[in-house]
Image (cartoon, grey):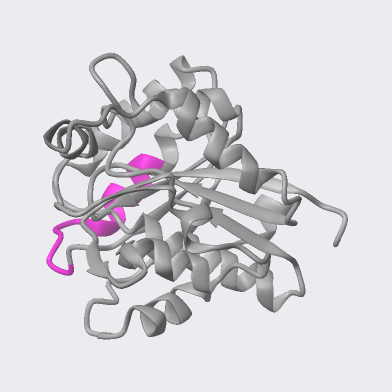
């Protein structure tokens, strides 16, 4: 088991679909099995200023689940203060992100050789990096399978199927998907999940109930673990 080296790109159907919670839960489950773990969030917008520099809460949560000796800047090499689309944040600061640079940053962590390495995107699949590239181009450059976190709410079927189609057209394998129940009032939740199961040609890795009542992110992540099937990603 410890000889495995699995790498996945964690994508979401939209912003706040639950990518970080799911990614951290998968890393924690791997860590609890004695596996080495690493993670990268190449781009993060919505940071706070600290004496060490800009810090993003999602990236810090990922770092906390890494067993490999990584610095914050390795996990989150590109950080922006404003919680806005990354390419807009970069433009406002007179910067220009490029996929080849993001690929280089990310590859450095992948080369650490952890048993499980997760690369978390930002927002949805086609979030722009610059005027012509998107974060999907990063996943393509890395050539790693995708795990899709579906934020279960009204409209998610369309968002999900379009994203699945885009992943396939980009030549990447969808390794699995997670139904994350972010809207506790969603009508016909079970029917929506069943519709997605019938239409997505990839395994469902779990259904995560709404965990909003749990205040601490670490506690939500811990609760999330029991609803996810890590073994399908390790085999």
* Residue 228 visible in the shown view: no
Q: Is residue 213 magenta?
A: no
Q: Position of residue 118 (x, y in %)?
A: 56, 51
Q: Is residue 193 magenta?
A: yes
Vertical side of 230 occupied by 84: above or below: above
**Magenta region, main secondary structure:** helix
Residue drawn at (75%, 67%), measured in percent from left and top?
35
Q: Residue furthest front?
A: 51
The residue lying toward the viewer, choosing from 206 and 15, is: 15
The residue lying toward the viewer, choosing from 62 and 11, is: 62
* Residue 124 visible in the shown view: yes
Q: How many marks?
A: 0
Residues shaded magenta: 184-196
Residue drawn at (25%, 38%), measured in percent from left and top?
157
Residue 22 figure quarter: bottom left
Residue drawn at (47%, 29%), measured in percent from left and top?
101
Q: Position of residue 89 (x, y in %)?
A: 17, 40
Q: In screen coordinates, is 43 left or right of 47?
A: right
């Amino acid at each position: 088991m410890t000889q495995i080296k699995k790498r996945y790109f964690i994508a979401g159907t939209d912003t706040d679909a639950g990518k970080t919670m799911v990614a951290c839960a998968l890393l924690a489950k791997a860590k609890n099995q004695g596996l080495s773990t690493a993670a990268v969030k190449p781009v993060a917008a919505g940071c706070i200023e600290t004496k060490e520099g800009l810090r993003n809460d999602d990236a810090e949560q990922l770092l906390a689940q890494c067993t490999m000796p990584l610095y914050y800047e390795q996990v989150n090499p590109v950080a922006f203060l404003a919680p806005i689309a990354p390419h807009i944040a970069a433009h406002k600061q007179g910067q220009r992100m490029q996929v080849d640079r993001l690929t280089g940053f990310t590859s450095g962590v992948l080369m650490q050789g952890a048993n499980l390495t997760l690369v978390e995107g930002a927002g949805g699949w086609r979030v722009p990096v610059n005027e012509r590239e998107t974060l999907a181009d990063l996943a393509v450059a890395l050539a790693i399978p995708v795990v899709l976190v579906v934020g279960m709410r009204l409209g998610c079927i369309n968002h999900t199927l379009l994203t699945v189609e885009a992943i396939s057209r980009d030549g990447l394998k969808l390794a699995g998907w997670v139904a994350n129940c972010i809207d506790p009032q969603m009508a016909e939740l079970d029917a929506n999940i069943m519709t997605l199961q019938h239409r997505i040609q990839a395994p469902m890795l779990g259904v995560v109930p709404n965990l909003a009542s749990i205040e601490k992110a670490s506690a939500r992540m811990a609760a999330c673990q029991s609803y996810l099937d890590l073994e399908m990603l390790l085999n």
